[in-house]
Image (cartoon, rainbow, N blue to C red):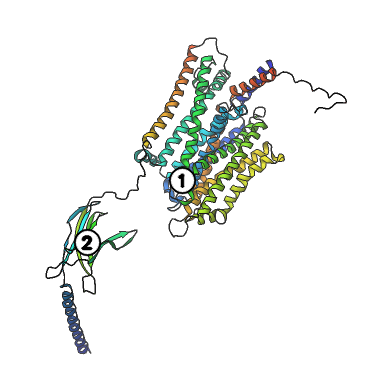
């Protein structure tokens, strides 16, 4: 058991290391991220001053980059739900080293995603109109309710399993860190000392949350899809949209989790805990969801093409042959077939291959959101010339600012909170060691009797 | 030159006057074969039915039945203005045709009623005026079937249930905090 103790000490030191040591490279990264966020804020002030006319959005194509990015962020927020809740329920132990960062991605993505809706409004004060004039029958109200509930649930689900680790930070960093950190860890640890009563309460709380968070997460992206599907537009006229969006959300969530995991693993030397196994298993999940997405796309597009309602032909042409063809083909080939090929070919079935697949999927899923939003609005409702949409520098800058904010919040999180669920990884390790110790030694193979054969 | 021009102008004026008088006398003669009386309420309310009635008789009092009457109203839509046909009716045995019209906008409406009297080659018309008040929104999409239980109440119940469960988690957190305060008991060997 001494080896277990040494292993746990090493684990704790690994978890504490980002908080104890801060390099110049870290501050350089933060400065770069802050600079991009600041540029995004400047672009937003231009939009506030001059109005939405500074964007490429007009009356016919009234949603663009902002709404596509909103859908994208809400999608990647499913990273935490899938890894943490579904795998926790299914008792998949390999998830333990990545749960914390997955849960944090959820919270950060929701914050960033919700911001883009407010940015899209033009005047942020109009958010109040949702509460003043909102109607229960509107999917927009359902969306507001679902996202606020999901954000609250995700913050609680991030916080509750972190309590023992916050107590670890409180105890191990006492007197060796700044006063605000001492106060923060003492407050957030809520008096955790690991007694049996606390453990029971913690287990009960996690049990409730992991069940609750799954339907909430599914409802969130379903309702986001309904904002489109319940609008009278031919390309969005689909009963499949809810399931399609949820599958796409989990798909992009896994991809962004793989990317963030790879960066943190390299930056904080987590190779002992975040191993190739985690990457491969997530890579398999990525490939499985790519297959689901291919199925959903075929089902969706074939039905549109078969019925060919008015506007459907225009839509299919713009997707496969005209304006959106390069983007759409990249999404299909790079984003959907690519991960499957990478998972199937032994030469690419490794950490690097999975990370490459994740990058492809992340780009492809953002493109997919953009294509859904813009191409759907581009189909003319009356016999007029189809409108065009090109994002302006203001929109690109705000997008860059939003992505930088996402990276910045994760960067800062790693410097304040434990990025590994120490107690869960330790429990997993202890269980593995115990299982090995309890396993009877293997019976040596009996040599085949000379001259005889086994039938 | 001036005298010739004045002469020609005078002749032209006389000819035009004679032509106009002839046309007016002819029109009176054409219209005089029927007697028309409209019966339209002077006021109405947006969304309420307004009966637009017309009574067509011969000068000797005989009802003209079976005459088709067309009603027109001035309208504006999407930047285009003009007359639109709002309905048709046929005179009954009493010579009365009635269109039940539902005004969709407030204001003074001049409804032009057109009919082709028996024996006449050209449609004749009368104009009736009525004023409409109010501003009710008439265009509402159908609410669909009213399925018992599927309503905002259900949404609130589900949402309330979720938030209650989240609240129950906060009670667990209170339990954890209390157990930490109370026990400085040497029991703790939990996850650290």
Furthest-front residue in this view: A455
Q: Using the rendered image of the protein, determine whether residue A45 is visible from the camera's viewpoint.
A: no
Q: Which residue is painted at 55% across and 57% down in the image?
A: A322
Residue topped by disc 1:
A229
Q: Is residue A415 left or right of residue B88?
A: right
Does any portion of residue A53 appear in the rendered image? yes
Residue A109 place in picture, x, y as percent: 52, 36
Q: Look at the picture and state if A300 lies above or below B57.
A: above
Query: Residue B192: x, y in percent?
Result: 58, 18
Image marks 1 and 2: residues in contact by CB distance under 8 Å = no
Which chain is mark 2 on? Answer: B
Going by the picture, which residue comes out furthest to the top?
B186
Q: Quadrant of residue B2?
A: bottom left
Query: In the image, is B118 to the left or to the right of A384?
Result: left
- Left-right relation of A223 to B115: right
Quadrant where the N terminus of chain A sits is: top right
Q: Name the one closer to the observer, A295 or A316.
A: A295
Give the secondary structure at mark 2. strand
Q: Quadrant of residue B91?
A: bottom left
Q: Which residue is disc 2 drawn over?
A: B110
Between residues B14 and A287, which one lies in front from this camera angle? A287
Query: SS for tag 1?
Result: helix
Going 51% across and 28% down the picture, which residue do you hit?
A: A211
Between B15 and A439, the residue placed more toward the observer is A439
Quadrant position of residue A142: top left
């Amino acid at each position: 058991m001494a080896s277990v103790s040494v292993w746990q000490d090493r684990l704790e030191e690994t978890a504490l290391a980002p908080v104890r040591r801060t390099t110049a490279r870290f501050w350089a990264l933060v400065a770069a991220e802050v600079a991009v966020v600041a540029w995004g804020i400047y672009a937003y002030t231009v939009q506030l001053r001059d109005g939405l006319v500074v964007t490429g959005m007009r009356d016919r194509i009234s949603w663009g980059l902002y709404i596509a990015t909103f859908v994208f962020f809400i999608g990647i927020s499913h990273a935490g739900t899938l890894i943490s809740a579904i795998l926790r329920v299914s008792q998949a132990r390999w998830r333990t080293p990545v749960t914390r960062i997955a849960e944090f991605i959820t919270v950060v993505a929701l914050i960033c995603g919700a911001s883009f809706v407010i940015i899209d409004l033009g005047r942020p004060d109009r958010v109040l109109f949702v509460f003043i004039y909102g109607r229960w029958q509107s999917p927009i109200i359902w969306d507001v309710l679902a996202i606020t509930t999901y954000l609250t649930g995700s913050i609680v689900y991030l916080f509750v399993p972190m309590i023992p680790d916050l107590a670890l930070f409180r105890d191990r960093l006492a007197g060796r860190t700044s006063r605000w950190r001492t106060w923060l860890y003492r407050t957030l640890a809520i008096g955790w000392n690991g007694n049996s009563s606390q453990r029971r309460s913690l287990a009960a709380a996690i049990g409730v949350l992991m069940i609750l968070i799954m339907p909430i997460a599914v409802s969130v992206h379903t309702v986001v899809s309904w904002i489109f599907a319940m609008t009278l537009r031919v390309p969005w006229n689909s009963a499949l949209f809810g399931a399609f969006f949820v599958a796409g959300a989990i798909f992009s969530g896994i991809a962004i989790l793989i990317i963030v995991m790879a960066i943190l693993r390299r930056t904080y030397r987590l190779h002992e805990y975040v191993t190739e196994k985690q990457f491969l298993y997530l890579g398999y999940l990525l490939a499985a969801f790519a297959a689901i997405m291919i199925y959903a796309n075929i089902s969706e597009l074939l039905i549109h093409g078969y019925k060919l309602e008015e506007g459907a032909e225009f839509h299919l042409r713009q997707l496969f042959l005209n304006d959106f063809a390069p983007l759409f083909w990249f999404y299909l080939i790079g984003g959907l077939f690519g991960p499957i090929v990478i998972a199937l070919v032994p030469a690419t079935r490794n950490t690097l291959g999975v990370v490459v697949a994740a990058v492809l999927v992340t780009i492809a899923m953002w493109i997919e959101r953009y294509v859904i939003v813009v191409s759907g609005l581009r189909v003319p409702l009356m016999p007029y010339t189809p409108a065009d949409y090109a994002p302006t520098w203001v929109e690109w800058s705000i997008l860059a600012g939003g992505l930088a904010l996402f990276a910045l919040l994760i960067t800062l999180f790693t410097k304040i909170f434990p990025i590994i669920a120490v107690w869960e990884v330790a429990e997993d390790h202890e269980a593995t060691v115990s299982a090995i110790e309890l396993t009877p030694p293997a019976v040596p193979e009996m040599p085949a009797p000379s001259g005889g054969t086994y039938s | 030159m001036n005298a010739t021009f004045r002469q020609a102008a005078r002749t032209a004026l006389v000819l035009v006057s004679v032509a106009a008088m002839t046309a007016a006398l002819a029109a009176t003669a054409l219209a005089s074969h029927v007697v028309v009386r409209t019966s339209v309420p002077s006021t109405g309310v947006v969304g309420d039915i307004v009966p637009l009635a017309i009574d067509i008789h011969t000068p000797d009092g005989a009802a003209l039945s079976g005459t088709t009457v067309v009603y027109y109203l001035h309208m504006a839509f999407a930047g285009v203005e003009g007359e639109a046909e709002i309905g048709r009716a046929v005179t009954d045995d009493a010579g009365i045709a009635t269109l039940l019209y539902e005004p969709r906008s407030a204001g003074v409406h001049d409804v032009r009623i057109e009919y082709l009297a028996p024996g006449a080659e050209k449609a004749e018309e009368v104009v009736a005026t009525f004023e409409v008040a109010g501003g009710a929104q008439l265009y509402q999409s159908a609410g669909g079937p009213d399925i018992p239980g599927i309503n905002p109440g259900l949404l609130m119940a589900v949402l309330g249930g979720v938030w209650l469960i989240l609240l129950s988690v906060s009670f667990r957190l209170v339990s954890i905090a209390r157990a930490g305060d109370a026990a400085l008991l040497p029991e703790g060997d939990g996850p650290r």
